[in-house]
Amino acid sequence: MYAASSSVSAPPRQLRPQHAGGGPYLDPSHAAGAAFGGGRARRAPGLGGQPLSGRIDLSGPQGTQLRTAIAAVHRICPEFNPVQVLRRSGRSVLLVGSTGRSTAVAKCLLDHSPAWAERFRHEIATYRAFVRHRPPVRVPRLIAADPDNCTLVIERMPGRPAAAQRHPADSPPRADVRAALGAVCRVNLWRPPAGMFDMPLDYGKRITRYHELGLLTDRDLGDLQKLLHGLAHVQGQFCHGDALLSNILLSPAGPVLVDWDQAGWYLPGYDLATLWTVLGDAPGARRQISQYAQQAGPVSRDAFLVNLMLVLTREIRTYETAVQRALQEPAPTAPGAAESGEEQRLLLRRLHDDCALARRAVRAAVGTR
């Protein structure tokens, strides 16, 4: 457990000059990031730049959970003054508040099942690693953390999410997509010290699991195993692991990446496959991602296709579960509930179309081996 005043807090970063056409820490060796426009997004700051105000409702059963979460935060950061509930789900809650003269975000896990607790502790370990070894993109500074109680306090970064939804209903502005791609590419080019991160994804087990669940056909299983066999000795690539546009904040100082609970070493192109998947209404960005993912040759192409099939299959499983749950529940009464269910069904149809496209590309790649 770390108190807020302990040495876990990173020292203030020195200001570095901005290179033309690039974001913070961009140097000539990061040409791939520059190609995607790592420059500043010309937008006013979003919610991250607004002053704190409001009051937290601590009544009812949910209020009891919030009081427990706030108590956990105060054990490691006594000066934290909660002001707003930024986001809440069945698994975690994000609280915005002040710590002295600065603002901070406290993240507390509500679902302490082993899998989610492990992911939360991995995120804490990642932020601790960033204290000594800064990545080439802007990340929130760690203030305090308690891995035993799954509580994390980080600085509140100014900016607005590149997208409010996991799968944006409308195509994001091209400048926002360029900024997000540039930040992701700089992360992928980073080589953190050996032993700092592991491999969060076991590709062989994941492929077998999806096949057992009926999400992959027998031919899919064989094709992906063939590609995976050819990638056995490929050097891994450091990835954010959940490079959604909603996990990228855009600000005048440059993009900020948050939610690092799945960071680690993957086959090359995992973050690009994630971005390709969620940019369904941006064919130009998809084309650019595909070209960049394949420019290093057949090995890079095969790794990207394996990643793409797994990411798309995961999204299909997620939204099929959501649609089935919506069908089993009583008729929606809240305004917009029916429209939300229809949007999920349309998204699921698009994901199946994307998966069919990726499946054909995988089969073509196997045919060239």
Image: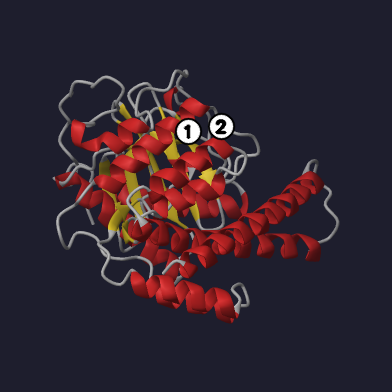
Picture quarter containing residue 248?
Answer: top left
Measured from the top left, where is residue 141 in percent x and y? Answer: 26, 39
| Residue located 42% across and 36% down the image | 180
Mark 2 / mark 1, whichever is N-terminal? 2
Q: Is residue 192 above or below residue 81?
A: below
Q: Is residue 34 above or below residue 76?
A: above
| Residue located 24% across and 39% down the image | 136
The label shown at residue 343 is none
Disc 2: which residue: 172
Q: Alpha-carbon neighbours of circle 1 within 10 Å: few (<14), some, or many (≥20)?
A: many
Residue contact between numbered discs 2 and 1, judged by CB atoms under 8 Å:
yes
**How far apart are the alpha carbons under marks 2 and 1?**
7 Å
Q: Of residues 99 and 23, which is closer to you in this image?
A: 23
| Residue 315 visible to the viewer | yes
Disc 1: which residue: 177
**Residue lying furthest front in this view?**
368
Q: Secondary structure at mark 2?
A: loop
Measured from the top left, where is residue 130 in percent x and y? Answer: 22, 47
| Residue located 48% across and 46% down the image | 275
Quarter of the figure that contains the N terminus: bottom left
